[in-house]
Amino acid sequence: RSGAYNFDEEEINEIQQICLNRSSSNSYMVSSGRPKLVYARHFYYTKFPLLSEYTYITFVRHPVDRVISAYLYYHFSDRESIQSLVPSEYKGEDIEVCVQLNHEGCTSNLMTKYFCGHAPYCSSGSKEALTVAKYNMKHKFVFVGLVEEMEVSLRLLSVILPDVFGKMDSSFLPKINKNEHSEQDRNITALSKLIIMQHNKADMELYDFAVTLFESKVQKCLLKEAYNNHKFMV
């Protein structure tokens, strides 16, 4: 749901073969010493037993902002491929209703599921799911950036994986997509945001955990100047 992929055994094997063969429309070769491959796609945390050496990188954003952005995108996008994902009877429904009923575009605790993986309990937002998500984030992801701290995140990424991202500078800052439908247009109020937080408690805790890990890595990777002169979002 919400743009992520659940992989079965056949699909996992296909991805492993893509990485082993260094070829896919979703992959990018990096020419620096030994050939490396970046495989870019939205999918829940997955183990790849045939790959002896791989790691994960990703970005996260504040859960309230994520839900609002996804709601506006899924419910008011002009793209036919997106319109088809939301049943017509739910199209354009109030965000509070969308969140409370866990409809497409308002999926609760989606970040926790991404980091937790494919197990049934990963969709629950439970303590078990959150514990696994935190473990994977800390031990299986070499880099977790913050959308709210994009420039510092990219600098950190260039230090952590210099062979792949070492040449990045401010010119690599991505274009920020702006949804043409604003929060005000769709009556997204302070109460709406409170309801989102109540239905995404696991994600809220996981995001705070991500911020803590991020700040720690910034310090450890000798970006002290950026750290000392920058107020982090919490």
Image (cartoon, rainbow, N blue to C red):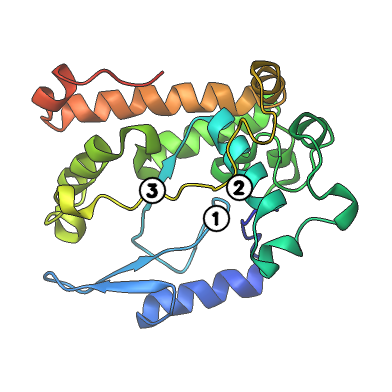
Q: Is residue 197 above or below residue 133?
A: above
Which element is circle 2 on?
Answer: loop
Q: Earlier in the sequence, mark 2 or mark 1?
A: 1
Tell me the number on the disc at residue 192.
Answer: none
Farthest residue to the front: give it. Answer: 185
For marks 3 and 1, give the CA distance. 28 Å
What x and y, as percent, mark residue 71?
Answer: 67, 43
Taking the spot 21% from the left edge, 29% from the top edge, the residue there is: 218
Q: Assign a secondary structure to mark 1.
A: loop
Question: Which sits in the foreground, 11 or 112?
Answer: 112
Q: Which quadrant would residue 195 be assigned to in this image?
A: top right
Q: Nearer the viewer, mark 2 or mark 3?
A: 3
Which of discs 3 and 1 lies nearer the camera? The answer is 3
Q: State the residue at coordinates (62%, 57%).
A: 3
Kindly report the distance in space between the C-alpha atoms of the residues bearing marks 2 and 1. 6 Å
Taking the image as drawn, is residue 232 in sight?
yes
The amino acid pointed to by label 1 is Thr
Q: Is residue 173 above or below residue 63?
A: below
Q: Nearer the viewer, residue 204 or 56?
A: 204
Q: Which residue is mark 2?
A: 117
**2 or 3: tag closer to the N-terminus:** 2
Q: Secondary structure at mark 3?
A: loop
User: Tag count in the figure?
Assistant: 3
Q: Tell me the crowding category of disc 1: few under 14, some 14 to 19, or many 20 or more residues within 10 angstroms, Cα based.
A: some
Q: Marks 3 and 1: CB-CB under 8 Å?
A: no
Please name whichever residue, 185 or 37, is drawn nearer the observer in this view of the structure: 185
What number is the disc on residue 176? 3
| Residue for badge 1 | 46
